Image: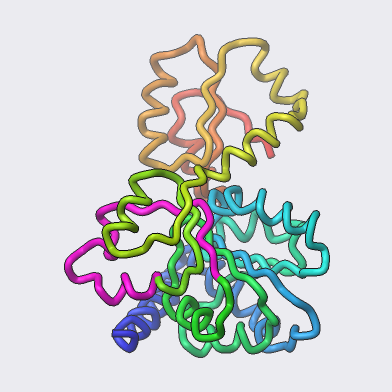
Amino acid sequence: MRFIYSISIHLYTFAIRLAALTGNNKAKLWISGRQLQKHHFSENHNDDQWLWFHVSSLGEFEQGRPLIEHYRSYNPQYKILLTFFSPSGFEVRKNYKEADLVLYLPSDTKRHARMLLKNFNIKTAFFVKYDFWFNYLHALKKSGIPLYLVSGIFRKKQHFFKWYGSWQRRQLAAFTHFFVQNEPSAELLKQIGYFNFTVTGDTRFDRVVKVAGEAKLFPEIEQFIQQQPVYMAGSSWEPDEKFIIQLIQKRTDLKFIIVPHEIDEERIRNLLQSLPCKASLYT
C-alpha cells in the first residue's frame, strides 16, 4: 500500500507541474519555491537541535504560532524549522522571524523524508490540524522522533474512518499524542483504537486573543470607514464573493472590506471588475 501511495504522490506532483506549465500561478510558486530551496535539504544541519513545525497554509500557521513562540521563549537552545505545503501560506510568512528556517515541504516521497531526517537533527516534530503526509510520518516513527498533532480535527468523511482505510489508520501510530480541538474528534479516534489524545481546543483562539491585545490603528482604514458599520470578509474565495457582491448591492449603509485568500494580480483584477461599485486597494 505504501508503494501505491508513493506513486500517487508522484502523479500529484506531475499534475502540479502540468498546471504550472499551463500558467497556474499557485502551481508555479509551488514548483519554483521548492526548486530554489533544494540546497537547504541537502546541506548538513546536524550541529544544531531542531524542532520541526509543519503547517499546510496560513490558517494552520496561526494555529501553530502560539506554540512556536512559546518554544522560542522558553527553549532557546532549539532551532526551529517551519515548513509550509501551500504557497499562500509560505509567501506571506517566509520572513517569520521566530523560525530559523522557513521552507516549503518537499513532496512526500521516501527519499525526501529520509533526506530531511538525515540532514536535520530533529528532536521533536509538530504537525498542525490535518496535514498528514504518510512517508514523513513513517520516517519519523522509524527514527523514534516524538511527533505531536496540534489543534487536530477529525471528521467521519476522512479515509481513516472508512472501511477501506485500514492502512491509513495504521499510519496514525506515528503520533506520540493527539491534541484535538473537540470531543467529536476524540470520539472518532477512540473508535479506531487511539486513546493517546487530549481535547485542548483550537490554538488559533490564543493567537486571536494576543492580536486583539496588540491592536493597531490604521489611519487610512479609519478614514475609509468614517465611523460607519463595516462588513469585513477575511480570507475570502470567489464563491464567497458572489454572495458578498449581492450584499453590497442591498446594503448601501455598510462599508465593505474584502481580504481575499489569494492576492495575485489577476485575482485582484478579477475581483475589482466584479464589484458593483468603486473600490480602493490597500496593502
Question: For this rendering, which residue is in front, 95 or 1?
Answer: 1
201 or 244, nearer to the observer:
201
Q: In screen coordinates, is 95 left or right of 52?
A: right
Across and down, in percent, residue 263 comes to 56, 48
On the image, the x and y values in percent for residue 203 come to 57, 45
Measuring 64% from the left and 89% from the top, which residue is drawn there?
118
Residue farthest to the front, as pictured: 195
Residue 39 located within the stretch drawn in magenta: no
Image spot of residue 79 (x, y percent): 76, 69
Residue interval drawn in magenta: 147-172
**Residue 23 shown left or right of residue 121 in the figure:** left
Residue drawn at (56%, 13%), measured in percent from left and top? 229
In this image, 142 relative to 119: left or right? left
> Is 240 above or below relative to 143?
above
Q: Is residue 148 magenta?
A: yes
Image quarter in which the N terminus is found: bottom left
**x, y percent for residue 185:** 36, 50
Residue shown at the point (32%, 50%) measured from the top left: 187
